[in-house]
Every structure is written in C-alpha cells, then in structure tokens.
Image: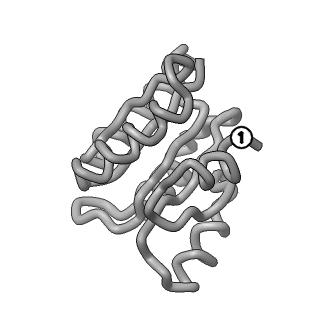
Amino acid sequence: MLKILLIDDDKINNFLNRSIIEKHYGSDCLVTEYTNPEEAFDFLKSCAQENSKNVPDVILLDINMPEMSGFELLEKMRDENVSLVNTKMFILSSSLDPNDIERSIQFESVVNFISKPLNNSKLEQYLNH
C-alpha cells in the first residue's frame, strides 16, 4: 500500500489533493494530511525514530505556510537529523519563483518541485517513477 503524506496549511488544497490521489490510486493508497507543519514534523520524527510502519512513501510539502514554511520544516529535519531514507519528498507549491525551485532542490531529501495544482498527469510524471 502506497502511503502519501500531505503537508499544507490549506485544508481545501489537502482535500483536493487527497481526492485526486485517491481517485488515481484507489484503495492501494493511504493518504494522511497535516495542516500544521510542527505537528507534521513531530509525526515524521516519530516515524524516523521508531522506524515505524507509518513512514510515508511520498511526502507532498507546501512551502508557503504561516507557522513554519516548508523550507523551515526541511531545515529542521536536516538539523535534527530526521532522515526518512526510502521516502520521496516533493515540494508542491503555487510559487513560480525560480529561487524557490532552486532552493527546494538544494535539499538532499527533496526529489523534485511540482507546481500546483496537482493532477493525474503530474502524479504519473513524478510519483510513478
């Protein structure tokens, strides 16, 4: 079963992304979502420490969030050595700023930058490889 974690402060975006993912993957997928990046960090930290079965296969992370940006979350993960070796992490953002795209791929844990909105062709392009 594919486990996907959505981290986005916008509940509507999470709802839409969950719907697209579940429609695409069907019952072969479990989607978890967090609107608070601090809570998402705590979850990921516990996954890394416990090497639990809850470790996501894929993380879709927004960068523009008020409490903690996606970049700050990535920095915190790096600084606290929260490593999820087999997890593919993607930035999923509406930002078109080339600096954001460049900055996102500087993180070793980030596979790629996906521009919103998420759709079936982007799932095929990025997640199925």
Label 1 crowd bin: few (<14), some (14–19), many (20+), radius 10 Å: few
Q: Establish if 85 lies above or below 8.
A: above
- Which amino acid does the dot numbered 1 rest on? Asn
Q: Residue 116's quadrant in the figure?
A: bottom left
Q: Residue 34's quadrant in the figure?
A: top left
Lateral position of residue 120 relative to residue 63, left or right: right
Residue sitting at x 42%, y 29%: 31
Where, quadrant-wise, is the C terminus in this rendering? top right
Measured as percent of width and height from the top left, residue 89 is found at 59, 48
Q: Nearer the viewer, residue 92 or 56?
A: 92
Counting the numbered discs, the total is 1
Measured as percent of width and height from the top left, residue 11 is found at 22, 48
Looking at the image, which residue sits at the far right? Answer: 129
Residue sitting at x 60%, y 47%: 123
Residue that mark 1 sits on: 128
The answer to whether residue 48 is seen in the rendering is no
Residue sitting at x 33%, y 47%: 16
Q: Establish if 85 lies above or below 94.
A: above
The answer to whether residue 85 is seen in the rendering is yes
Measured as percent of width and height from the top left, residue 17 is found at 40, 46
Q: Establish if 96 lies above or below 127.
A: below
Measured as percent of width and height from the top left, residue 40 is found at 35, 40
Lateral position of residue 25 relative to residue 76, left or right: right
Structure colour scheme: one colour
Q: Nearer the viewer, residue 5 or 51?
A: 5
Q: Nearer the viewer, residue 123 or 52?
A: 123
Where, quadrant-wise, is the N terminus in this rendering? top right
The local secondary structure at tag 1 comes to loop
Looking at the image, which residue sits at the far bottom? Answer: 98
